[in-house]
Amino acid sequence: MKRPAAVFGLTLYAVLVLLRDRDISVYAAAATVSAVVFCITLLIFLKKRRAAALQVVLTAAAACLFICGAYTAKYTLVYQPAMGRVTEEKTELTGVVTEVGRSSGDYRYTLRCDGGVKILATSSADLFLDPCDSLTVSVNGIRALGGEDNRPYYMAKGVYLGARVEKYITSERGVSKNIFDLLARYREKTCRGLVYSAGTENGALLAGIVFGDTDDLSQRVKNAFSAAGISHIFAVSGFHVSTWAALVFFAVRMLRVRRKYAFMLPSAFVLLFIAVTGFPPSAIRAAVMAVILFSGNSFRLKSDLMNSLGAALTVICAAEPFSGGSTSLLLSVSAMLGVILFADHLYPAVGAGVLRLLGRRVPAYLFLFLLSVLLLSVTITAVMLPVMLLTFGRVSVIAPLANLIIVPFAEIAMPLGGVSALIGFDPGVRLAGSACGIMIRLTDRFASAFSLRAEFDLLPVLIAGAAFGAAFLIVKLLLKRRPPRGVFLFAAFLLCFCVSVFTSARNFDRIQVTAVSGSRMEALVRYRGFSMLVCDGKPSSGTESALTGAGIYDLDVLYLASDGNTRFIGETFEPRCILSPGDTGEASGNGIDLVFSPDFLRVEADGKTVVFLFEPDPAAGFEGADVLFVRSVPAETVEAECVVVPGKGGNSGNIYYTKNGFEYIS
């Protein structure tokens, strides 16, 4: 067997992704039975290569048994005892701060309490603490972190419990001497120094690029980078590790260090760097692969990328059996698979074609460099496409082009800002901050000019896949030989991407109305790039995530149906226009017409009419409505196609009344 480490490591990770946060008892049995059935099937069909197949099967089976045992042990011995601390009573919490952060206007402090259990303490006030400090607070009970969607994320981070700070009691500076706490303290202070030296917005982006710390970065900038498809630069992974490793290697070679040590020093620096960033799984994956690569070069041994990836996943999964819940690791692994599976096949063919067409001149090599960067971005995007569509439901259409133009500025800003911060050279930090400012302006242009994002629609993708499979069989029969596997897979991924773009382009010209909250009248209206949020009172806790998940970069109109605290939504999405209770008038543009008053809001676009009725008397504004939002159960005389009554479905969602009868949607 050529790649035992690859088979073992990828099997480990695949099992963890399937398990995620689930109870091991049922799913481990299902995974074991599925593995046995798969092994038997594989051995039956591979008669000619049964010996090689048997090795693969036995290696995969050993991996399944190993990781199921590790997951069971972690779930039983660590996670369940931690859940025993859950309580609804007020209690006093004491621990050492290991990590600080900010989110949604709150300050978050990860505390390492008795027994090594980590608890995320959330406070509405800044307690001015750093890692290594001790903290004692009174909290309103201790709860399990996350719901069904984001619990795997917290489990992968090793933080299972959360609490809301009710009263600050006492704290003490610099109590912990743990090496990892000291590194976290250094990271926090360095990030604050970057923000101070380079400016609030530019410095916050620089801290995000260098250390992956986006706490000081405004949500508007985060939304812009997400809409442009380049938010991956905030996740410490292969981009950061490869840049730092290449920089250190170049420096030691300039100092004429012996070859063996020249490869060892970058490995040591990479390990130190991921320790400073807090050991994110995606960074560990990149670091282990880099160490294997440099170690092989030190002893003049050739390393295999697929085996290196498998070894990295083995280290990660063995150290943290809950790592299957890390989305950044999933995207990092899929991106690396894209490089391994497609890059070696596509680059030589493309390079030979370009040189044959343009000749071996300087412009040809420059064009080949730009084309290789674009091809790398397209290759990674093609393989990450199924993961992103299934995880987020959408993917940025302009990501390859945005990566080609904007990422080079990050490759300049990251080493320049990091080295300058290390030696205390403020002009270098400010210059790196200027590069970050250019990145922000370019990203704003991309996000605002190209707001279309490919959305996942299963039916057209399945139809396109079936058609592509039929075409593949026809080509195989006509040519009497099988097309290259890499080309086939790459074309299949690109086809799914094009189908998703076509589906999104079709929906782009249709008015879309999404109920954001199930407890109040709160909805998002989109049409041809226009976006409007209607809030009846204070926005719900899921408003921000709903808007971000819908691919909203900024808001055109924020309509406040009644008084409520919308400060955070206003700061996050910076609406161009805010309409308050009592405003009356009309507005039109971009194919959409608005009529608003204290009693109702009427939206017309694409031949459809959406009405939000704020008063119980439906006498004005709702005639001919296709969709009608009301605060209470409508009268029987209402003849709208669909009537939405928020909050009448209990805690699960809204109640929809349609002409076809009663329908409950959770």
Image (cartoon, grey):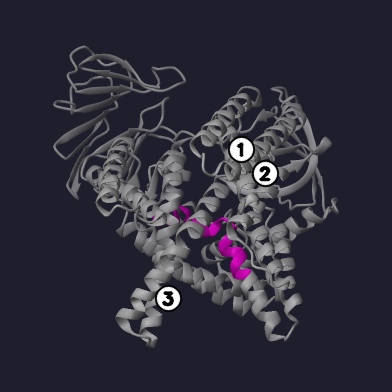
Amino acid type at mark 3: Phe
State the residue position of label 1.
16
Describe residue 571's horizontal placement relative to residue 150 as left or right: left
Q: Earlier in the sequence, mark 1 or mark 2?
A: 1
Query: Cβ–Cβ below 8 Å for labels 3 and 2?
Result: no
- Secondary structure character of the magenta stretch overall: helix
Crowding at mark 1 (Cα within 10 Å: few <14, some 14-19, many 20+):
many
First in sequence: mark 3 vs mark 2: 2
Question: Which residue is label 2 attached to?
Answer: 317
Q: Position of residue 660 (x, y in %)?
A: 21, 15
State the extent of the magenta-drawn residues as a range. 222-244
Structural crowding at the residue carrying mark 3, measured as other residues with C-alpha within 10 Å and reported as few (<14), some (14–19) or many (≥20) = few
Q: Is residue 446 magenta?
A: no
Where, quadrant-wise, is the C terminus in this rendering? Answer: top left
Distance Cα–Cα, label 1 vs label 3:
38 Å
The x and y percentages for residue 316 are: 68, 48
Circle 1: element type: helix
Q: CA distance from mark 1 to mark 2?
A: 8 Å
- Mark 2 lies on a secondary structure that is helix
Q: Identify the disc placed on residue 369.
A: 3
Residue 618 to residue 147: above or below: above
